[in-house]
Amino acid sequence: MKKIYLITTIYLSPEKLKSNKIRACDRKRCVGYYFKLKDAKHTVESDWASLSECGYYNVLVIEEMGQGLYGDHEINKEYWYIYKDGWKEMDKPKCFDHIVNFGIG
């Protein structure tokens, strides 16, 4: 099955970043996708398009998805980043432990 790698920018307040109870983004936006993971990671890690939009977004996820409706309900991997003078890898925020499909809802 062909895969795509969706890049979604997210804003989470500091309280939500620390919490494991809140399960909603303050705001989010799918900004694009790639057919190769290395291209998606390069775009994020080089901050090619100023993805934080001057602090409007502070978290980002790259989701690996299969083709079809809602990614055919198949997410194989998620790659999470936080913005701190550039995009740095992070663990998935606890408040999203059971949430998937950020890019396409």
Image (cartoon, rainbow, N blue to C red):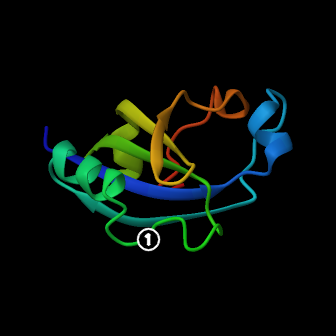
Where residue 100 appears, as percent x and y from the top left, is 53, 38
Quarter of the N terminus within the rendering: top left
- The reply, left or right, for residue 98 in relation to residue 14 is left
Inspect the image, locate mark 1, and give the three-letter code of the amino acid beneath it: Ser
Which residue: 86% across, 41% down?
Answer: 15
| In the rendered image, the vertical position of residue 50 relative to residue 76, given as above or below | below
| In the rendered image, the vertical position of residue 89 relative to residue 58, given as above or below | above
Along the line of sight, which residue is nearer the eye, 46 or 25? 46
Where residue 36 appears, as percent x and y from the top left, is 15, 48
Q: Residues within 10 Å of mark 1 (few under 14, many from 20)?
A: few
- The reply, left or right, for residue 75 in relation to residue 12 is left
| In the rendered image, the vertical position of residue 99 relative to residue 4, given as above or below | above
Q: Which residue is mark 1?
A: 50
Which residue: 49% across, 42% down?
Answer: 81
Quarter of the C terminus within the rendering: bottom right
Along the line of sight, which residue is nearer the eye, 3 or 36? 36
